[in-house]
Image (cartoon, coloured by chain):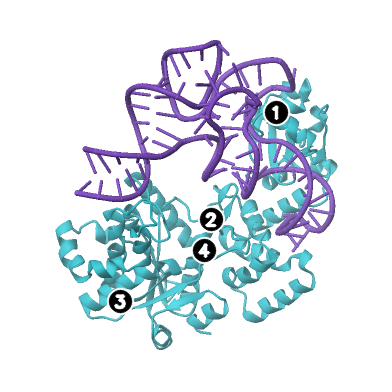
Chain colours: A cyan, B purple
Amino acid sequence: MNFVEELRWRGMLHDMMPETEEYLLKNKTTGYIGFDPTADSLHIGSLVPIIILMHFQKAGHNPVALVGGATGMVGDPSGKSDERNLLDEETLNKNIAGVKGQLARFLDFDNSTSENAAQLVNNYDWMKGISLIEFVRDVGKHITVNYMMAKDSVKKRIDSESKTGMSFTEFTYQLFQGYDFYHLYKENNCKLQMGGSDQWGNITTGTELIRRKAQGKAYALTCKLITKADGTKFGKTAGGNVWLDANRTSPYKFYQYWLNSSDEDAEKYIKIFTFLDKETIEQLIAEHKEAPHVRVLQKKIGEEVTVMTHGKEAYNNAIKASNILFGKSTADDLKTLDEQTFLDVFDGVPQAEIERSVIENGLEIVPAFADNSFLNSNGEVRRALKENSISVNKEKVKDDCVITTSDLIADKFVLLQRGKKSYFLLKVI
RNA sequence: GGUGAGAUACUCAAGUGGCCAACGAGGGCAGACUGUAAAUCUGCUGCGCAAGCUUCGAAGGUUCGAAUCCUUCUCUCACCA
């Protein structure tokens, strides 16, 4: 199956420039997607463009991942209603390094094993040497302001509904991204830029620049932005973004995010986020419809994506953790765990240290929860107790409960819990 | 630079001297029900066990009493130039 077909049946394709599909069918080509270094880790929203590049590579084309060291300094106004804060250079460099490292986990950058190895570029490398005068004469001259103003990303910020206006900096952004495309077209023979549908305007500025400045033809392809059925933002939880970095979002939480997808979303996600073939997916969907409560789809997505992102071992631990946390395990089960297993399971669960003598003297339930920044105040603990939502070692407790040494797991830990999903560890020192 | 409007809890938003720890909505959290879901229902959502304490952009002031009145300051927005 060819690249465009692949994206199409997976429901990822949003729009293409005319003749893009024909061109890709006939030619092994080079295409790129840009990644914003707004943080030192990518989050699962970036997974879609990454996966597109992976498909692109699988189809025999040459993928280029561009890290926006320069464009990150300017700020993409697309989809933003407010002016963005600029990142300082130090942060940016840290972010670029982090993002680069993560991309390497997904794409094959190895020349020796792959004929069409992926390349990683940073637009700062070619942008840094361009003076303002050069830029204005060589780039700006080719694109009219009228053209730039017609872009949605700009229009939205200029019309009367906008409350903040738009700085010249952000207005210029599309020229930067356009110039990237032009540069890659010239230097890497890159003919295609891909991205989310919100990138259409920026991408076409690039093809326009290539047409005018190099009399060349370049192509654009955009993919659908991921939405959730309930209208909330994809990739966000109450705790913030779901990151690809295991230190920011533990593999367990990462797995849980996918597992908690709604049925409707799961049918979309399995196509988008896994590389399973059409038959397998259709079968899984059918299976899921038979018995939705088993959640085969969610489990499969969780497995595929977690393994791809964090590796097999991390996935297994996530499963183990899930079973213990959500299965029918009791305090007795917990106490049979050795320290290492216990730590693996609760990797990423916030914890606090506590003096052994405190436990030996008997720790009352209210201070146990409030004094270690698990819950915010004594009042909150008391409220929670009233709601019957407090557990110690997976067993519901009342306000007269006192934690003693007999409650210790592996002679070291006490598992505190508020509600079903919120855990906290006390570690005896 | 001119003119006008405004700043209240996570967000939106009432409140214009005592009945205000502050209406309401959303969000969040929890409980029940479930599939670790959706929908629904219920409770909670400044600190404190409580008495009480600290909150309404900031600082002062008037008053027995201020989110509410006065002064100054800071910031935001809109329109005009």
Q: Chain of mark 1?
A: A
Q: CA distance from mark 4 to mark 1?
A: 41 Å
Q: Do labels 2 and 1 touch, CB within 8 Å?
A: no
Disc nearer the start of the sequence (4/1): 4
Disc nearer the start of the sequence (4/2): 4
Q: Do labels 4 and 3 touch, CB within 8 Å?
A: no
- Residue of label 1: A379
What is the crowding at mark 2: few (fewer than 14 residues within 10 Å), some, or many (at least 20)? many
- Residue of label 3: A189
Q: Position of residue A70 (x, y in %)?
A: 31, 56
Q: Do labels 3 and 1 touch, CB within 8 Å?
A: no
Asked if residue B12 lies left or right of residue A291, the reply is left
**Between residues A325 and A399, which one lies in front from this camera angle?**
A399
Amino acid carrying mark 4 in the image: Leu
Q: Nearer the viewer, mark 4 or mark 1?
A: 1
Report the label total: 4
Mark 3 secondary-structure assignment:
loop
Asked if both marks, 4 and 2, belong to the same chain, the answer given is: yes
Mark 2 secondary-structure assignment:
loop
Mark 1 secondary-structure assignment:
helix
What is the crowding at mark 3: few (fewer than 14 residues within 10 Å), some, or many (at least 20)? some
Q: Nearer the viewer, mark 3 or mark 1?
A: 1
- Residue of label 2: A244
Q: Chain of mark 3?
A: A
Asked if both marks, 3 and 2, belong to the same chain, the answer given is: yes
Amino acid carrying mark 2 in the image: Leu
- Residue of label 4: A47
Q: Do labels 4 and 2 touch, CB within 8 Å?
A: yes
